[in-house]
């Protein structure tokens, strides 16, 4: 304990053993507090010869590295379990499995008010096989995450969970392929309080979204001006945060004014760029609405994400597309890609290419397994400067969806990159949430961030419920605070007949509870605030501000000129460097 020698504490223990605990409590409440455990954002997407050490030393897991044999571990289902060692590394193996859940397990006690981050290293005896980390609780089964495990090397599974009620739980691993052995090592389950989780977000926002600004005020002779008044007004924040729009924005002035009042930096079109909107009848393309919406965005300095080039869901194909032969479909698809990407070349910050191609496979089923790769490659050849995104749902919102886990996402991403290594790829995570599993959301983003590719939350909305607004705030805070998220777009375009799943405003363009959440967060994150302060004795004022565009005004009572105003852009830096502005008046 800082400030107290071990001998001093020993005297207290010998003479007044009953006073030690109260004394410690007093010291803690007096401000001598242990720092909250920092969150570990790292994840590995490589298959390694040996696993890494468990995160957080294993957290609440007993014997996380299996260095003490099978202490803390037991059989789950009808498997056989064995402790093994290879190359000095000790691990546990579940074999002779007849059911997917036949595995190894550990009994735990989980708390409702905690957020748990989970990780483990897994391997299978043969092939490439999905393996899931599962928690059996009193209120049902909870999936913490999944990985496509391989043979002959170790893969990191990273996930997370919360529970509906405090009580006993049992961790186990499962795979639908019962013919393989499941090997497990370096397991970690770390609980965080909500206060600790919020502190992670605050620290990350400060580091990733703000920068130091130093203003030096001098007179015409270069002398420092102490006690000068500095006014710093944010004109625009730089983080790409926005909302989808639809063609109602072209005709409804109330909708247009409401949208522009928010200061959104980015948008995406709900349906107007989709193939079925542009070419309802074969050979008859109509870009009129899309062109007008692009012009609206440009006129108001709002960036546009292109959504989408093609959609893999068979339900959304026009009848004439579905009826084409494979050779005719190939020609029609190539024509579609050439048409839409060429038309908007250089105008969009990104394109969703083969939308939702983890859940659906219309083009692959008709044109072969390499269809997605070919479409990505063709788009890149037309507009090589644009970022082309995989765009998928349930990767961050639903741990039980085996089709779109971060592991499956990575596998598809690698398939596309095989023939398109020069493509500027991006990771699009839709984010259509019911009840958010925030630890799972963060861990999934951690895993995908290990690719080094830009990550966007592309279609954030929340299922309608009494908790819709509070859940929206949870998700937006988590997305904005994650250091590897490059932009966020909400999926809440206004429609007089009702929005898709979430509205921000009523039909009179008065904020709903969700709209109030958006306003609150925009203001909190620096939305158009004005800061006034005085320079110190050296004529300097320093502060931290969110990245963005600012108007800085200087006034001084003894100066001949009444005031001076300058514009400045404060951007992200990779060090502790300051953005410095010299103002001479």
Image (cartoon, grey):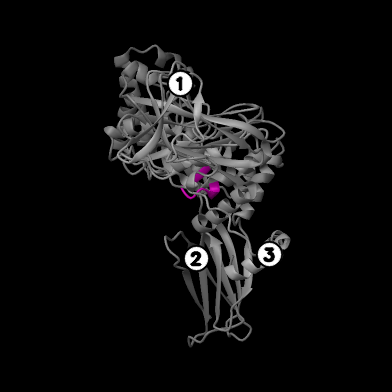
Q: Earlier in the sequence, mark 1 or mark 2?
A: 1
What's the residue at 52%, 43% (across, down)? 488
Task: Answer with mark 3 or mark 1, whichever residue precedes in sequence.
Answer: 3
Mark 1 or 2, which is nearer the eye? Answer: 1
Q: Is residue 148 visible in this depiction of the protein?
A: yes
Q: Secondary structure at mark 1?
A: loop
Quarter-wise, where is residue 166 in the image? Answer: top right
Residue shown at 35%/40% (left/top)? Answer: 89
Number of residues whose C-alpha sits closer than 10 Å to that of mark 1, classed few (under 14), some (14–19) or many (20 or more): many
Give the magenta range.
Answer: 480-488
Q: Secondary structure at mark 3?
A: helix
Q: CA distance from mark 3 to mark 1?
A: 50 Å
Residue 297 location, x and y as percent? Answer: 51, 44
Q: What SS does tag 2 mark?
A: strand
Residue 373, percent from left and from top: 32, 29
Mark 3 and mark 2: Cα distance apart in space = 46 Å
Q: Does the magenta segment cover residue 390?
A: no
Residue 437 placement, left or right of 70: right
The answer to which of 80 and 131 lies nearer the viewer is 80
For the residues labelled 1 and 2, say whether their Cβ atoms are less than 8 Å apart: no
User: In the image, which disc is placed on residue 27?
Assistant: 3
């Amino acid at each position: 304990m800082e400030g107290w020698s071990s001998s001093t504490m020993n005297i207290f223990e010998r003479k007044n053993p009953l006073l030690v605990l109260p004394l410690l409590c007093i010291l803690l409440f007096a401000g001598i507090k242990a720092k909250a455990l920092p969150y570990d954002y790292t994840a590995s997407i490589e298959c390694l010869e040996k696993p890494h050490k468990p995160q957080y030393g294993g957290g609440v897991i007993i014997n996380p590295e299996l260095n003490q044999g099978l202490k803390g571990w037991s059989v789950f289902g009808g498997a056989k379990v064995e402790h093994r060692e290879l190359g000095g590394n000790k691990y546990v193996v579940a074999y002779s499995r007849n059911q997917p859940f036949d595995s190894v397990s550990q009994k735990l006690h989980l708390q409702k008010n905690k957020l748990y981050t989970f990780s483990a290293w897994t391997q299978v005896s043969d092939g490439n096989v999905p393996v899931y980390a599962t928690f059996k609780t009193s209120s049902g089964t909870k999936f913490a995450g999944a990985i496509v495990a391989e043979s002959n090397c170790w893969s990191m599974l990273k996930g997370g969970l919360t529970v509906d009620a405090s009580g006993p739980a049992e961790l186990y691993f499962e795979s639908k392929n019962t013919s393989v052995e499941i090997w497990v090592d370096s397991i970690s389950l770390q609980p965080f309080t909500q206060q600790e989780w919020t502190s992670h977000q605050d620290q990350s926002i400060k580091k990733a979204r703000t920068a130091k600004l130093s203003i030096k005020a001098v007179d015409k002779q270069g002398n420092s001006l102490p006690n000068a008044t500095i006014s710093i007004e944010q004109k625009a924040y730089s983080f790409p945060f926005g909302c989808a729009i639809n063609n109602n924005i072209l005709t409804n002035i109330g909708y247009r004014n409401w949208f522009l009042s928010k200061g959104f930096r980015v948008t995406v079109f709900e349906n107007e760029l989709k193939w079925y909107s542009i070419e309802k009848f074969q050979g008859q393309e109509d870009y009129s609405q899309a062109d007008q919406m692009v012009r609206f965005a440009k006129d108001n300095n709002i960036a546009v994400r292109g959504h989408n080039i093609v959609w893999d869901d068979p339900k959304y194909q026009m009848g004439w597309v579905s009826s084409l032969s494979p050779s005719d479909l190939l020609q029609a698809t190539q024509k579609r890609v050439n048409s839409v990407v060429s038309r908007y070349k250089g105008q969009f910050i990104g394109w969703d290419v083969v939308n939702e191609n983890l859940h659906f496979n219309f083009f692959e089923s008709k044109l072969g397994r390499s269809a997605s790769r070919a479409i990505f490659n063709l788009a890149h050849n037309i507009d090589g400067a644009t970022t082309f995104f995989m765009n998928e749902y349930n990767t961050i919102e639903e741990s039980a969806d085996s089709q779109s886990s971060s592991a499956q996402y990575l596998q598809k991403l690698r398939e596309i990159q095989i023939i398109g290594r020069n493509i500027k790829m991006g990771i699009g995570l839709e984010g259509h949430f019911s009840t958010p599993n925030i630890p799972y959301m963060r861990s999934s983003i951690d895993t995908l961030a290990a690719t080094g590719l830009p990550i966007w939350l592309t279609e954030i909305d929340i299922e309608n419920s009494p908790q819709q607004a509070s859940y929206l705030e949870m998700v937006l805070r988590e997305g904005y605070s994650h250091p590897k998220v490059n932009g966020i777009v909400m999926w809440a375009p206004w429609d007089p007949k009702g929005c898709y799943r979430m509205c921000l405003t009523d039909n009179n363009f008065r904020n709903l509870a969700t709209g109030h959440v958006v306003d609150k967060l925009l203001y909190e994150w620096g939305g158009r605030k004005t800061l006034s302060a005085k320079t110190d004795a050296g004529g300097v004022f320093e502060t931290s501000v969110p990245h963005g565009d600012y108007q800085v005004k200087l006034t001084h009572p003894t100066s001949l000129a009444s005031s001076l105003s300058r514009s400045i852009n404060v951007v992200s830096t990779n060090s502790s460097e300051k953005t410095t502005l010299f103002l001479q008046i």
